Amino acid sequence: MKSLSPALKSHLCSGATTLCWCWKITRRDGAALGFTDHDEPVGFDGLAYAAATGFTASEVQSTLGLAVDNLTVMGALSSQTLNEADLAAGLFDNAEVEIWRVNWAAPDQRVLMRKGSLGEVRRGKAGFTAEVRGLAHRLNQPVGRVFAHGCDADLGDGRCKAAVAPVAGTIVAASDARRFTAAGLESFAGGWFSAGKLTFTSGSNAGRAMEVKRHGIAAGVVSLELWQAMSEPIVAGDAFSVTPGCDKQFATCKSKFANAVNFRGFPYMPGNDVVLSYPASSTPLDGGSRYGN
């Protein structure tokens, strides 16, 4: 049930309305952006909603119960605040979205129609398509711990407790926005930083991070490959810091980080093979330890 102000009710009942849609997007970095389908900018609550940005939305789908309401927004990469670099950098990932119905002739007459967050974003050369998910989608997110063989903690966090310090490095030469050679990591064995987090500390990508797909070293030359291309070019001299990689397995936690006591997985949990197996004289099923004392 929407609560409408008396002025907005009167306007809707007048028979001739001056209504538009306004979208407010709050990015991960806290920046708030406003867009409208009206042909002139609209402003309220201290935010200007830009017009003529090519930002449009599909019909809102609403259902009873706990099903996720959603719609699709499409836009052209023509606005200075809505561009390919910011989309590629992930600044719009899971951004908060508010959808308002506004009387553009009197913006104080408005009602909040939907609130949610951005889901899947698909980018093209000149535009993008994004899914807006309703608040009910949060009920689909896992809550609490999951019993699994792998660790569910993040390397170095309060549950992992491993003392992990990032290592500084410098770009020597880049093949593209994903692959490059680096200096400063020569003392580490190949693969040490695979699955680690690389954060640029200078250059066009300063402050942006990406996971390392591959770390190799051959003849003293260190090479790194990222899982996704950075939004800006990588050039020689760019500085970065990178953390060791962790594959969440007990053997890695024990040998690489000497942190077995804090491992947050269940490496000895029986798998499907045990569940589907049948009794045999060579396999004791007396409830005792399967791994000896």
Image (spheres, grey):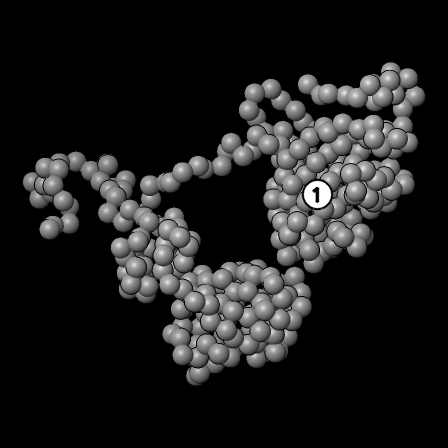
- Percent of width and height locating residue 207: 61, 63
Instruction: Classify 106 as above or below 90.
Output: above
Q: Residue furthest right?
A: 16
Which three-letter amino acid code belongs to the residue tagged 1? Ile
- The residue at the point 89 percent across, 24 percent down is 17
Q: Which residue is mark 1?
A: 25
- The residue at the point 71 percent across, 21 percent down is 2
Q: Secondary structure at mark 1?
A: strand
- In front here: 217 or 156? 156
- Percent of width and height locating residue 85: 69, 58
Is residue 12 visible in this depiction of the protein?
no
- Percent of width and height locating residue 169: 52, 75
Relative placement, left or right, of 224 versus 43 is left
Which quadrant of the view contains residue 208?
bottom right
Q: Residue furthest bottom?
A: 219
Instruction: Classify 84 as above or below 166.
Output: above
- The residue at the point 7 percent across, 40 percent down is 281
Relative placement, left or right, of 89 versus 59 is left
- In front here: 211 or 3? 3
- Percent of width and height locating residue 220: 44, 83
Which quadrant of the view contains residue 142?
top left
